[in-house]
Image (spheres, rainbow, N blue to C red):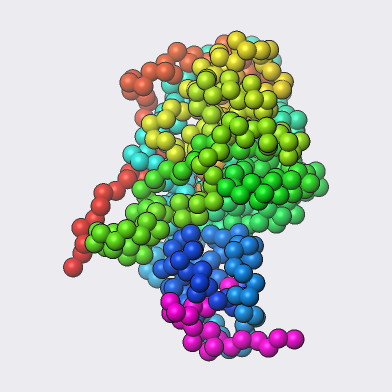
Amino acid sequence: MPSLITGQTVAEHANRDSCWIIVHSKVYDVTEFLDEHPGGSKIILKYAGRDATEAYEPIHPPNAILDNLPIEKHIGAIDPNTVAKVVKEVTEEDKRRQTLLDARPPLDEILNLHDFESVARAVLPAKAWAYYSSASDDEITIRENRNAFQRVWFRPRILRDVASVDWSTTILGCKSSLPIYISATALGKLGHPDGELNLTRAAGKHGVIQMIPTLASCSFDEIVDAAQPNQPLFLQLYVNRDREITKKYVQHAEKRGVKALFITVDAPQLGRREKDMRMKFVDDGAGAKVQEGQSDVKKDQGVARAISSFIDPSLSWKDIPWFRSITNMHIILKGVATPEDAILAYESGVQGIVLSNHGGRQLDTARSGLENLVEIVAALKTKGPWPNPNFSIFIDGGVRRASDVLKAIALGASAVGVGRGFLYAFSSYGQDGVEHAIKILRDEFEMNMRLLGARTINEVVPEMVDASALHSHTGANPADNLYNQTYQPLSLAQFKTK
Ligand code: 173
């Protein structure tokens, strides 16, 4: 049995020439990996000779070291008696957060999804909030996603015996208690120690479908293992430059029972999210370096860009037959934004599309999914049967209310993705938060369907909405006060202090 390594030995390797770190009680020599680290060397060097677990965990899937660091660099296990328990420095921010965590509103006072967002903004570490809430450039699209819903008005029907209403549906052949699925969002452990498992457990309990993100903090298998037997799961896919890795991942997911593959097609490069970038500037002191003209892009790019270099920007329509050849799962293209591409998708033989702008995080001033829905449904009607049981349209972006969802369904969506809404629910209250979010949405569906005069999702028809103003980008919308209170304006570059 190999002998344990002492903390003192690790501490002797605390610089660029010899850099060891401890992660999950194992010691690694990362000296030669420093310059390959997608997040830059500086962050590793901060933990040189020490335990890096706490910083490592939220951002890396559990097998990241095994996959990236040659086995001869795995030095061995640490002798736990020789590392002083890392006494975490309690910062002013930690204290502020803890006070707010202790004073969170009780869950029964959380009345809507905006409430979760406001609690999450207060209790999340600043970096996590910056990463989750950020959107690209001037953040016009993220706000337009909300505004678009308010340009659609209801035309409710009356006297229809709505004593009993049912908002359950089927999504890609899977039963769902809501016409909503949980959309993929990366890095769940930035928000809560259980990360994505909060979603899996709540979804299993309440018959909701979760889309597992490629860049989850928990491993794919941890998530599937946390699901109930036969709990339907979807998978979001970032396509790797190395197609063999993608093939293995997709086929493993299919073997483990995943029902549908949502291939992200709107992110050949990640958007510049300035809230996220600005946070890095401040905390890593990288801002000064950049101003001095050193161009180490790794330092100022924010969390997401740092870990996204594996995504293949050469992905094209030519790849679709290959995906069909490696899996029998439903294939959905996530991030379609025009009728032209919707028709290409339909003709390529995939089973559906998500009209999405990636929560406003990619091309800024791209239109909302809701607005695109109207044109795309009209275009697809010219191509084949409608509604088409073999081709589904989903939208996501800015959904906070059941009424938003009902508008999308009236205009032709099969179901709607909610990403940040659930992310903020578990970031503020863990699994209980997600369960409560589902309950709120159920209550909203019951009320809105009764008031709309629709007993089932099939009865939510185009005639129930007036979308005539949807394409007008100039009119004033009623102020979205709750959203506006949680929306945090972008900030400008700061002068150096001292
Ligand atoms: O929107 C995102 O942040 C995202 O999709 C992503 C992509 C790559 C790495 C991390 C997150």
Q: Is residue 464 visible?
A: no
Q: Is residue 133 visible?
A: yes
Q: Is residue 487 above or below residue 245?
A: above
Residue 472 sits in which quadrant? top left
The C terminus appears in which quarter of the rendering?
A: bottom left
Q: Residue at x 40, y 58 (%)?
A: 298
Is residue 78 rendered magenta in the image? no
Residue 15 image point, x, y percent: 43, 79
> Could you say which is closer to the camera, residue 205 or residue 490?
490
Residue 22 sits in which quadrant? bottom right
> Could you say which is closer to the camera, residue 113 or residue 22?
22
Count of marks, rendered view: 0
Residue 207 image point, x, y percent: 72, 39
Residue 70 sits in which quadrant? bottom right
Range drawn in magenta: 1-23
Is residue 4 rendered magenta in the image? yes
Residue 58 image point, x, y percent: 55, 61
